[in-house]
Image (cartoon, rainbow, N blue to C red):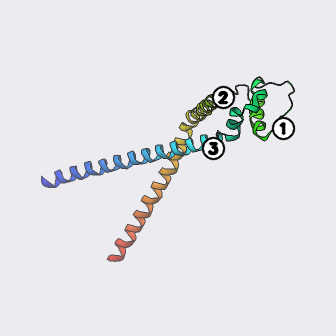
């Protein structure tokens, strides 16, 4: 009777260990996916200090007066400070003219890209981490069999 109980406990313990490994796999994949996706969205949508300096500079008042995304010909400013701000204002139709709104716009773009890509990146990282765990398990299994057979 004691052997049957030990066998049942052993089976339960192995099942419990497999569930813990599966949870670790999913958690590691989730952390990896979130980190990679957020780093990619920060890289894709950087805050440009030259644009923010142009927004704050008083000599760029003419650039602030240009309509966002304006296609009408406007002369590019000679100031280096205003040039990046000018290119930003004329390129994007939703370009803002103050630094706070610019930072908020970049943060929204980053969050939108993150939400759009997180599912795909999670599945990719889950597959990658799963393959890594499978290789580690196979290596440990082969290594254990090899050393076990050498001891005999």
Of residues 87 and 50, the one drawn nearer to the viewer in this rendering: 50
User: Is residue 110 left or right of 143 when viewed as pictured?
Assistant: right
Identify the secondary structure beneath mark 3.
helix
- Residue at the location (42% across, 44% down)? 27
Of residues 94 and 140, the one drawn nearer to the viewer in this rendering: 94
- Residue at the location (43% across, 48% down)? 25
First along the sequence among labels 2 and 1: 1
Q: Which mark is residue 78?
A: 1
Identify the secondary structure beneath mark 1.
loop
First along the sequence among labels 3 and 1: 3
Give percent across and percent down for residue 110: 59, 35
Q: Quadrant of the C terminus?
A: bottom left
User: Is residue 62 left or right of 140 when viewed as pictured?
Assistant: right
Identify the secondary structure beneath mark 2.
loop
Of residues 69 and 51, the one drawn nearer to the viewer in this rendering: 51
Give percent across and percent down for residue 111: 57, 33
- Please give the count of numbered marks on the rendered protein: 3
Label 2: how many Cα within 10 Å (few below 14, some 14–19, many 20+): some
Query: How far apart are the alpha carbons under marks 3 and 1?
Result: 29 Å
User: Is residue 92 left or right of 111 when viewed as pictured?
Assistant: right
Question: Circle 2 sits on which residue?
Answer: 98
Question: Circle 3 sits on which residue?
Answer: 43
Instruction: Assess whether mark 1 and mark 3 are in contact (beta carbons under 8 angstroms).
Output: no
- Residue at the location (78% across, 41% down)? 80
Give percent across and percent down for residue 81: 75, 39
Which of the 4 image quadrants contains residue 46?
top right
> Mark 3 or mark 2: which is in front?
2
> Mark 3 or mark 1: which is in front?
1
Q: Which mark is residue 99?
A: none
First along the sequence among labels 3 and 2: 3
- Residue at the location (76% across, 32% down)? 59
Give percent across and percent down for residue 17: 32, 50
């Amino acid at each position: 009777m004691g052997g049957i109980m030990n066998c049942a406990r052993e089976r339960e313990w192995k099942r419990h260990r497999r569930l813990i490994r599966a949870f670790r796999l999913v958690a590691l994949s989730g952390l990896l996916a979130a980190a990679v996706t957020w780093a990619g969205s920060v890289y894709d949508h950087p805050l440009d200090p030259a644009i923010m300096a142009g927004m704050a500079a008083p000599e760029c008042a003419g650039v602030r007066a240009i309509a966002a995304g304006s296609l009408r010909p406007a002369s590019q400013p000679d100031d280096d400070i205003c040039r990046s701000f000018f290119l930003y204002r004329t390129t994007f139709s939703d370009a803002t003219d103050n630094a706070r709104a610019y930072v908020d716009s970049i943060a929204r773009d980053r969050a939108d890209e993150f939400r759009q890509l997180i599912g795909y990146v999670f599945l990719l990282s889950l597959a990658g981490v799963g393959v890594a765990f499978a290789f580690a398990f196979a290596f440990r299994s082969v290594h254990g069999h090899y050393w076990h057979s050498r001891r005999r």
